[in-house]
Image (cartoon, helix red, strand yellow):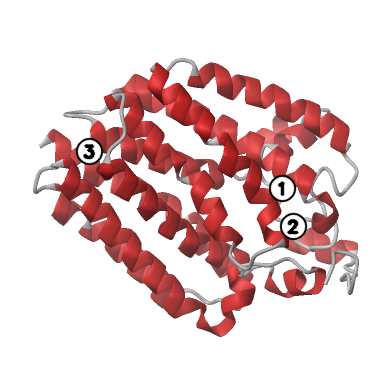
């Protein structure tokens, strides 16, 4: 099936009701009118994706730090994650502009709605990437090369939903690279511990992004977009539970290999309980509940960061 076959015909009312644009965002409301489409391209109104990109970075920093994580390093990763997530969203919107026009949740995004041309969006994408490069250059040389290597999974991910039923895996490759980069920024090398943490992040992404994809499964099937939500269907709950169990096991294994103190292990009980609550309470037929559960993974990520920090501070 291609993007032009069986395209759903949505009314403006349906688009306004289902749009993922946060019309109540104070930043968007108060920004100059000419800036608003570009801020929307960066998803300034919906920063949860930036937090999900940031958390593995902070995990890697906290796990590698012998004591309190360096706040300057955490701040650099904060700026870098929000910048590069924005760049990734712009690139994704350029690549997916034809699909986005046919999916009710994304039809009002700046490019498919005609507020920004693909050419202007590409120029803006390069400008945002330049900011990300300036942040990366503040790290040690080994980290810079690790960061450059992240461009490969970032470039590949947006195309995967056309070819495979598990694009979430490729998103996991891209979104969790920070686990490697965070460790490298502190230690100047890579080892088994950050590798296990990177794998944990990939399984975490398989879980939370499958939840996210359940919002669009009907439209995705119509326009030919592939996802684990479409592939797994009614079997999504046990599979996501499996992804989350592996996530916790690998995070604990990474901590163990890194030589973290015993405090880390009981501290992991809270994030583990959070994932159990997610998977037992989610309503896959309720798009708003899927979006709510997806967003709450930011809290899970922060709880894991706290567990790593406590394990090395105490």
Give the residue number, with chain letter if any, for mark 1.
Answer: 23
Q: Label 1 to label 3, Cα distance in Å?
A: 36 Å
Residue 49: give x, y in percent of width and height.
Answer: 55, 46
Relative height, residue 290 to residue 43 (above, below): below
Q: Nearest to the eye among marks 1 and 3: give it.
A: 3
At label 3, counting other C-alpha atoms closer than 10 Å, the crowd grade (few under 14, some 14-19, many 20 or more) is many
At label 2, counting other C-alpha atoms closer than 10 Å, the crowd grade (few under 14, some 14-19, many 20 or more) is some
Relative height, residue 270 to residue 83 (above, below): below
Q: Label 2 to label 1, Cα distance in Å?
A: 9 Å
Relative height, residue 217 to residue 176 (above, below): below
Mark 1 vs 3, N-terminal side: 1
Identify the disc placed on residue 19.
2
Identify the disc placed on residue 309.
3
SS class of the residue under badge 1? loop
SS class of the residue under badge 3? helix
Of the 4 image quadrants, the one containing the C terminus is top left
Residue 280: give x, y in percent of width and height.
Answer: 39, 77
Where, by quadrant of the figure, is residue 120 drawn? top right
């Amino acid at each position: 099936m291609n993007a032009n076959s069986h395209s759903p015909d949505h009314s403006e009312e349906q688009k306004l009701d289902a749009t993922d644009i946060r019309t109540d965002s104070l930043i968007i409301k108060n920004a100059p009118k000419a800036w608003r489409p570009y801020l929307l391209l960066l998803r300034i109104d919906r920063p949860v994706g930036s937090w999900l990109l940031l958390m593995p970075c902070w995990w890697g920093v906290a796990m590698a730090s012998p004591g309190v994580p360096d706040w300057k390093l955490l701040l650099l990763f904060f700026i870098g994650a929000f910048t590069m997530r924005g760049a990734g969203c712009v690139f994704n919107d350029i690549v997916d502009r034809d699909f986005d026009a046919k999916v009710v949740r994304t039809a009002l995004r700046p490019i498919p709605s005609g507020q920004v041309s693909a050419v202007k969006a590409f120029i803006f994408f390069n400008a945002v990437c330049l900011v990300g490069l300036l942040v990366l250059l503040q790290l040690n040389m080994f980290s810079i090369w690790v960061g450059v290597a992240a461009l490969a999974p970032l470039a590949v991910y947006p195309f995967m939903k056309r070819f495979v039923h598990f694009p979430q895996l490729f998103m996991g490759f891209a979104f969790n690279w920070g686990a490697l980069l965070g460790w490298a920024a502190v230690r100047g090398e890579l080892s088994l511990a950050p590798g296990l943490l990177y794998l944990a992040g990939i399984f975490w992404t398989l879980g939370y992004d499958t939840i996210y994809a359940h919002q669009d499964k009907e439209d995705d099937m119509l326009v030919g977009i592939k996802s684990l939500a479409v592939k797994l269907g009614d079997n999504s709950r046990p599979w996501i539970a499996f992804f989350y169990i592996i996530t916790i096991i690998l995070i604990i294994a990474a901590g163990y290999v890194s030589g973290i103190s015993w405090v880390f292990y009981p501290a992991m009980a809270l994030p583990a309980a959070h994932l159990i609550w997610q998977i037992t309470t989610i309503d896959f037929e309720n798009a708003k509940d899927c979006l709510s559960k997806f967003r709450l993974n930011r809290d899970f990520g922060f709880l894991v960061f706290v567990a790593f920090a406590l394990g090395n501070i105490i």
